[in-house]
Image (cartoon, helix red, strand yellow):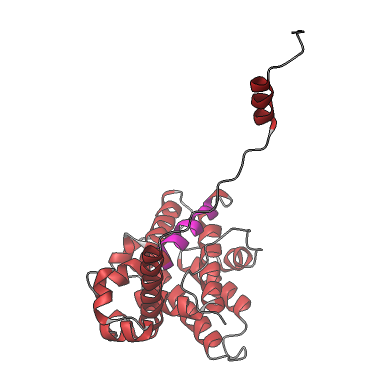
Amino acid sequence: MSPIEKTPAAQRALAQEGAPAESSPEVKAPRGARRKRDTRARLLGAALHLMAHRGVGGVTINEITEQADVGFGSFYNHFESKDAIHAALIEEVIGHYAVALDKLGDQLSDPAEKISASARYTMLRGHDDPTWGRFVFQTSFSRDSMSDGLGRYLLQDIGTGVSAGRFAVEDLPSVYIAVGSTILGGLAALSDQAELNHEPDFFGDAQTLAKRIAAVLLTILGLPKDEAQELANRPLPQIELPANPFAQPS
């Protein structure tokens, strides 16, 4: 056999080495698992819609299952209680968004500009997705939100600005409440404007109102008015934010 000749086995091996790897067929989840996942999503979507407009205290489990078109008993296959589904919504609808929004810090080193951009993004998200905005408003900046969700990052950003000497804050708890409440007020106004299909009115259009409120926030934190307005009117940096997984199609 000459040096360049190959045995049939060797030829097959070489052919296999050069051939593209066959893609494995997509494996579908078992039907039961898909059904369980879909039921959970329907329950979460129904709870989001109801709690956004009436708060967690104004909604019953029976109303959630009716809205989701799911048997009452099926609820407990997914959640232990109404508080449990509310906590799941906070994590999936607000928590993931807050983590992504915090990445603005990778682009903005100034705590003042980061708070301004974060507030504007949040208010504009409420205008684009009114149910999301109403849910955030209903959840509010409570004591619990100081360790989870948007409130946690707001408190963190204010603290960073205070430590850096960027913000003139003597009473941190009061300033946190003032800033958080102002954001929530703007969020509610823009969510209602969009949900009710109102034309820009006393509050103005969404982009303008978000900038005006951001400027007010910065003055609360001690920035001069002119500087606050300049920062609040800067172009928003580009950032990828997660969609509301339970948004209803328009």
Image spot of residue 20 (x, y percent): 67, 37
Question: Which quarter of the figure is the C terminus placed in?
Answer: bottom right
Image spot of residue 142 (x, y percent): 31, 70
Give the residue displayed 49% in from the left and 54% down from the top. 27
Residue 229, compared with residue 68, is above or below; it is above
Image spot of residue 212 (x, y percent): 57, 75
The answer to which image quadrant residue 194 occupies is bottom right
- Residue 45 is covered by the magenta coloring: no
Give the residue displayed 53% in from the left and 58% down from the top. 114
Q: What type of secondary structure mainly makes up the magenta span?
A: helix
Left or right of 193 in this view: 162? left
- Residue 100 is covered by the magenta coloring: yes
Region in magenta: 93-105
Q: How many marks?
A: 0
Give the residue displayed 56% in from the left and 77% down from the top. 128
The answer to which image quadrant residue 17 occupies is top right
Residue in the foreground of this view, choosing between 223 and 90: 90
